[in-house]
Amino acid sequence: MNLREWASNNEEVNSLFSSEDRAEVKSMKVLGLNGTWKVILFHIVLQKCYAIVFMLPKREILKYIASIFDPLGLISPVILDAKYFLQELWNKHLEWDDALSDDDQKKWISLEKQLMNVEHVCIPRSISANCSQLVEYRIVCFCDASQKAYAVAVYLHQRSEDTTKVDLIFSKTRLVPLKKLSITRLELLALVIGLRCLQFVKSHLHLPILDSSIWTDSQCVLHWLHTKKQLSVFVKNRVNEIKKISENVTISYVPSKDNPADIASRGQNLMNNKLWWEGPAWLKSEPGEWPQFKVPHNNKEDNSYESEIRKLKKPSEISLVQPSRGTNTIENTSSDENTGLLTINSQRFSSLTKLLRVTALVLRFCEKTTKEKYQQGISHVTKLKSLKTCR
């Protein structure tokens, strides 16, 4: 088989192929992306949806969004609004072939125009520093959350003696689940996803990464990571995962205005948006000169932090007098004195019936250990119901 359609941005390489085997085109589509070989750029090409002519059903909207090939998430802020619109259609319980309402039709036409502007965005095909000197590689990740989605943006920081280069290499966005979560919990999820993306990018770059850092604009999440108090189950599980996978990763605070992930979580235009493509300007300086932002005090954030702290329950006990059988007594485990009372925490049970059943099993066990006769069934429950000390 004779391989054909060879193309390169290097004229010396192109001259090695015969004219019959060489691709005589200025651009070529590879893996869903249009490449302009002369200037080494990628373009995202979208097909028009013709929403003005036809009353599009939900099926065509999903087909159009799924046809956008963006495996690295480089244009995720633009696609976010379209995905959020599709989620709203799901909430309206539309069938696959139901036509959109007039308001939804107008909204989609506006979204489609924004999507078509992506074709004017040029993405460099090479992110190499292009220098013969020793280069230091670092990975920097930013994460953020909003009412729409939570997102991360990962950058490759390359520094040599003469130049410093910062490029967006990976991004990921996830829509907020239908079961609404607080912004602080979403910020925590964004940090978890950010650490996972750091590991993913590091494993695929095959470069000697000097260090990694992740930045968040949520002071509440940073407090959760450093607190020694008992947290809620949802927060505790994710904090444990963060601590487990964040070894050798620096977690820092960054203001929202310097956080490029804020663009991905809210959806914005990417034309000439340097914050998105290159990160904040201070990344171009030496890592030792990067600002150490102080976490500001915010009463609202304090309330969010306190809402996830597990409050210690006050001991609420019920005292059950042991049924008289001989002179045996049951020792009170919460007191140093032998009071002859059985102490049980009633707040650990969801109903009185369940509390009585468990107490009956405990009394039966006590009788068995003392080699006394015990009765099967619910005889102890009947006895317990007659006790006047039960609250």
Image (tube, grey):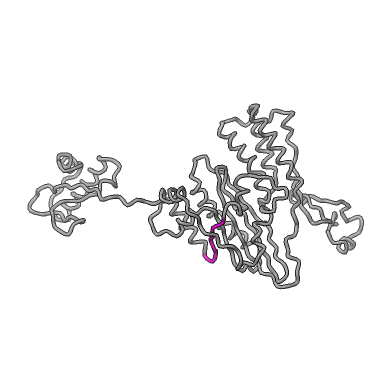
From the viewer's perspective, tell me whether residue 90 is left or right of residue 332.
Answer: right
Report the quarter where the C terminus lies: top left
**Residue 293 location (% of width, % of height):** 55, 60
Residue furthest to the left: 326
Residue positioned 54% across, 58% down in the render: 253
Report the quarter where the N terminus lies: bottom right
**Residue 301 location (% of width, % of height):** 47, 50
Residue positioned 89% across, 63% down in the render: 16
From the viewer's perspective, tell me whether residue 139 is left or right of residue 49.
Answer: left
From the viewer's perspective, tell me whether residue 98 is left or right of residue 250.
Answer: right
Rendering quarter of residue 135: bottom right
Magenta residues, start to end: 247-254
Count every numbered label the image shows and give the total.
0
The stretch drawn in magenta includes residue 253: yes
**Residue 184 location (% of width, % of height):** 49, 49
Residue positioned 30% across, 42% down in the render: 350
Magenta region, mostly helix, strand or loop? strand
Q: Is residue 97 above or below residue 297?
A: above
The stretch drawn in magenta includes residue 44: no
Q: Is residue 203 above or below residue 32?
A: below
